[in-house]
Each structure stands twice: as C-alpha cells, then as structure tokens.
C-alpha cells in the first residue's frame, strides 16, 4: 500500500464498529449441576509445571478450593511430571481426586459438573467445545481462543448446549476498573479522545536451542500438540515459552495484552474496530521466539482510537547487558512508563483523564489533579462463575463466552496485521504513519526506546504491519491484504483434534 492511501485512511473518520448484543444463554432448570450434596464438582485441565513459571492451573486449584460448596474432583495434564505431584498433594490432605492424561476420557465422566481450562492457548477451543457437548460448564483462561474462528465456535457451542462459560481477565476482576469505565462512559470527563494501553514490562530472551530438544519421557507430546502439527521441540522451556511461538501461542498480546484490551473495548462501546495496523519486531536478542517483543497496535474505533504499546526490553541497554550476563534481574526501575504507569490504560478525555492499572483507578482533571478514585463493586470471577453455574443464568456472568471471544479478536487482529506485514526502513515507516498524530507519536516513543537499548532501526528494521479492514458482522477481512489475512482466521487442524465447522 502506498503512503498516500495509508495517510488518507487515518485522515478519514473511522467506520462505526458493529455492536454485539450480549448472548442470552439461559439454560433450562433440568440442566443444573448435579454434584453430590449440591457440591459443584470441578475438574482442572492443564495443571501446569511446578517450575518458576507455567502453573496457572495450580493457581486456579487454590482459588476454587476456597469457595464453599466446590470440590476439585479431577485433574488432567499431558505431562505426568506435572500431574502426579498435584495428585499427591490432594492425597496428603485426604482428598480423593481422579487423574487423567487425555481430556476426552475426563469429559466422559458423569462425576464432573464443570471444567477449568488452563491449557496452552491452542487447546482452549477444543476443550471448551467438547466440555459443552458433554454437558459441562467451563471456566476458560485468557485469551479465550487461539484464533478468530475458534472463538466464534466456542460462542456457538455455549449457546447450543446452554452451558455457563466464563472467560476471565484483568479488566473484569473486582479492582475498581468497571466503576472507572462507567464514570467515563457517563461523560463525566466529556468526550473520549484516545484510549491508550501500555505494557512496559521487560522480558528476557527465551534462548536459542542449538538442536531439537528431547521430549521428556513423562510427556505425551501427541496430546500436548493436539490441534497443532507435531514438530521438533524448539525451545528449552517446554511449559511456558510456547507463548512466543505461533503454532501454540499469541505472544504478548495474548499473554498480557488481553487483560487490558478487554477494558479498552468496553470503553469504546464493546464492539470491534473497523481497521487495524501495527509496528514492531523482536529486538535486542536472537532466540527461538517468533512473536514481537516490541509492538504498537492501532485499533481504528469510534468514538476514539485505541493505541496499544508493548515493550519487552528494559529502560536502557545497561539493564539488558546485566540480564544477559546473569548479573541481576529486571526490576521496576528498569521499566519505561507512560504518564507515570508502566502497565495499564490512560483514557484521555476533553476535561481530564483516567489512569487505570491492575490495582488502582483514578480520574484527574486537565491540570493533573486527582478528582476521583474508584472502589470495586463486582464479585471475584471464580465466585461469579460458581454463582452462575448454580443459577443457570449466563446473564449473571461478569464475562461470558461472547465477551471473551470479542476481546480475543483484538489480540488476533493485531497479530495478523503484524504477521503479514513487511520490514521497512525507519524513514519509510515514519513517512507512512505521519498522517496520524497518535500513531506517529507512538512510533517516536518506540524509536527512542529501542535507541536506548542499542537497537539501530537502520540495521534491524521494524515490521510495518498490514493496514487491515475488518467486517465485524462476518468476522472476516475485506479489501486490501484480506486474502492473506483471512488465511490466519483459522488453521489447518491435525485429526482427530479438529475444531468443528458446526458445533
């Protein structure tokens, strides 16, 4: 696409986003969970590793065990080295728990009412769809889906089988975020001008394996791969670094970005953008990761654009040198920030702004004086899920399957733009984005950040993602680059792990 057409796009008013009606997936009373003594009997699929990172399943076990009337009755993991230690921990507390390697066998059990899905992303859809078909409710971790097609099939399965499906993320947790968004949407600060999401959190290299890594004897690699092709293991940290490889994960957008992109979407009306464009790359090291560690994503929304900025390198190259040498770890002092926050959202309005982080939410006037703070009134997501399982009303959910899907679409839009983009000289990228004030300013900040880390964009050019046009009604790309983009809406599945066209 030539510079004129790109600039022309950013000078035009953004096309209106399609609004999605909340799904009313109400179930009949006879579909109530039938656990012994009215207990809700849970299974956790994807226990996770006991190493430093990679154990979300164990976190969910601890959280759900604290809810009255909930029993963890089954665990599933394709790696026995993950599964057996957790089974033994239950046995030490005189609690009976069934153990499975294959989720299909777990779902055959009539002693399970609901499943908690904490698998790698590429398994989220199949476990959720199969669980709905088996008459079980689902609590599926972020991002809801691995790709756009899977998310829509998950929505359809929840509706067809009348299941309760919760999709948690940080924007829905009880921390004051929802209350801050209501304040903005009521117009208390006037018209929304820009919504900016930043995630400035240094992440070190995952290393580069000199040869394919051995598959642990405890792991069923066929089951681990599931819908994805079976390929040689090309990472040293098996149970976490899949996040940064396209066959299984969705990069930083899907790992951290989803927490805040969900909130950004709520701020601007809850629908999907008409256009998206990205700038970024994987800078500072060469490793087995494929996803960008530095990225700008511009979502063309009405009433205001959403601009996301990710930085995976520290504040400057001195921190990077120490981390590579193993001398220290990147702490808070190594992070950049935007308006004083390294991670969170800034909602710019006519008469002030709101700063929203995971832990605090406050409104400020145009002079920077704090005028309002927000306290949570929404319930914890785990508790909310159990309440909805009992009530059989999907409308009771804080974040149902449709909401999880729509927010995950933002992740996929950004990644698809980046993946079909092209590396370009710094001067050409600057020329192409100069027509939009917000995008141009974000790119200038990215340039300064990379320069501070010793990255020369003339020697290591960034990727300018394709400017894509998306039809929210059909959930397909249209116009220029649409053929390449639509190929990434779904994937080629490996039988028998196929996400069905019709659920």
Image (cartoon, helix red, strand yellow):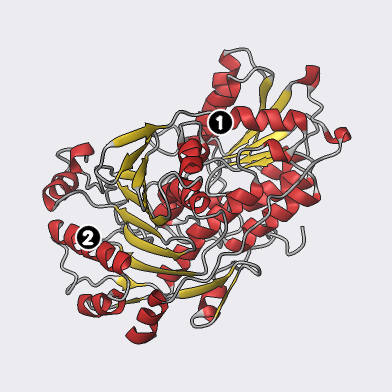
Tell me, for residue 495, which label it has, or none. Answer: none
Tell me, for residue 378, which label it has, or none. Answer: 1
Q: Are marks 2 and 1 in contact (CB under 8 Å)?
A: no
**Which tag is nearer the camera, tag 2 or tag 1?**
1
Which one is nearer the viewer's eye here, 385 or 231?
385
Instruction: Tell me the quarter of the image containing the C terminus.
Output: bottom right
The residue where tag 2 is placed is 445
N-terminal-most mark, 2 or 1 = 1
Callout 1 environment at 10 Å: few (<14), some (14 to 19), or many (20+)? Answer: some
Write down the quadrant of residue 21 in the picture. Answer: bottom right
Write down the quadrant of residue 83 in the picture. Answer: top right
Write down the quadrant of residue 355 in the picture. Answer: top left
Total numbered labels placed on residues in the image: 2
Q: Is residue 334 visible?
A: yes
- Coordinates of residue 155 in the picture (x, y in percent): 69, 53
Which one is nearer the viewer's eye here, 298 or 259?
298
Q: On the picture, is 309 further left or further right than 489?
A: left
Q: CA distance from mark 2 to mark 1?
A: 36 Å
Q: Secondary structure at mark 1?
A: loop
Callout 2 environment at 10 Å: few (<14), some (14 to 19), or many (20+)? Answer: some
Q: Secondary structure at mark 2?
A: helix
Instruction: Tell me the quarter of the image containing the N terminus.
Output: bottom left
Residue plotted at (35% across, 86% down) = 4
Residue plotted at (38% across, 53% down) = 235
Residue plotted at (72% across, 40% down) = 394
């Amino acid at each position: 696409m030539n510079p004129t057409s790109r600039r022309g796009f950013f000078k035009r008013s953004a096309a209106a986003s399609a609004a999605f009606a909340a799904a009313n997936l109400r179930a009949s009373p006879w579909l109530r969970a039938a656990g012994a003594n009215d207990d809700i009997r849970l299974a956790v699929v994807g226990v996770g590793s006991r190493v430093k990172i990679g154990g979300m399943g164990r976190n969910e076990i601890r959280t759900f065990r604290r809810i009255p009337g909930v029993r963890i009755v089954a665990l599933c993991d394709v790696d026995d080295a993950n599964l057996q230690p957790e089974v033994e921990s239950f046995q030490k507390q005189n609690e009976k728990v069934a153990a499975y390697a294959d989720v299909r066998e777990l779902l055959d059990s009539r002693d399970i009412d609901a499943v908690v899905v904490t698998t790698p992303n590429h398994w989220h859809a199949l476990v959720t769809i199969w669980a709905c078909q088996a008459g079980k409710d689902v609590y599926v971790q972020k991002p809801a889906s691995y790709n756009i097609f899977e998310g829509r099939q998950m929505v359809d399965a929840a509706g067809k089988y009348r299941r309760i499906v919760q999709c948690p993320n940080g924007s829905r947790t009880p921390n004051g975020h929802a209350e801050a968004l209501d304040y903005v949407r009521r117009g208390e600060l006037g018209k929304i001008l820009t919504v900016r999401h930043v995630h400035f959190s240094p992440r070190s290299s995952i290393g580069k394996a000199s040869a394919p890594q051995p598959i642990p004897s405890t792991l069923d690699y066929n089951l681990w791969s599931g819908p994805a092709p079976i390929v040689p293991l090309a990472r040293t940290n098996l149970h976490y670094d899949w996040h940064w490889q396209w066959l299984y994960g969705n990069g930083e957008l899907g790992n951290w970005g989803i927490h805040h992109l969900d909130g950004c979407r709520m701020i601007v009306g809850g629908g999907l953008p008409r256009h998206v464009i990205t700038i970024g790359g994987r800078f500072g090291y060469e490793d087995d990761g494929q996803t960008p560690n530095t990225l700008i994503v511009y979502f063309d929304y009405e009433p205001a654009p959403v601009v996301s900025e990710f930085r995976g390198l520290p504040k400057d190259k001195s921190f990077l040198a120490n981390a590579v040498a193993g001398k220290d770890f990147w702490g808070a002092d190594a992070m950049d920030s935007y308006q004083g926050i390294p991670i969170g959202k800034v909602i710019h309005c006519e008469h002030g702004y709101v700063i929203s982080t995971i832990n605090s939410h406050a409104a400020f006037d145009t002079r920077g004086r704090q005028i309002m703070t927000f306290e949570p009134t929404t319930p914890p997501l785990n508790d909310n899920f159990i309440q909805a399982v009992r009530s059989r009303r999907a409308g009771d959910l804080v974040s149902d399957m449709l909401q999880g899907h729509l927010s995950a679409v933002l992740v996929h839009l950004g990644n698809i733009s980046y993946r079909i983009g092209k590396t370009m000289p710094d001067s050409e990228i600057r020329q192409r984005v100069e027509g939009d004030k917000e995008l141009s300013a974000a790119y200038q900040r990215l340039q300064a950040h990379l320069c501070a880390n010793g990255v020369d964009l003339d020697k290591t050019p960034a990727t300018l993602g394709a400017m894509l046009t998306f039809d929210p009604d059909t959930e397909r790309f249209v116009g220029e680059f649409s053929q390449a983009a639509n190929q990434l809406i779904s994937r080629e599945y490996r039988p028998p792990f196929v996400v069905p066209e019709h659920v």
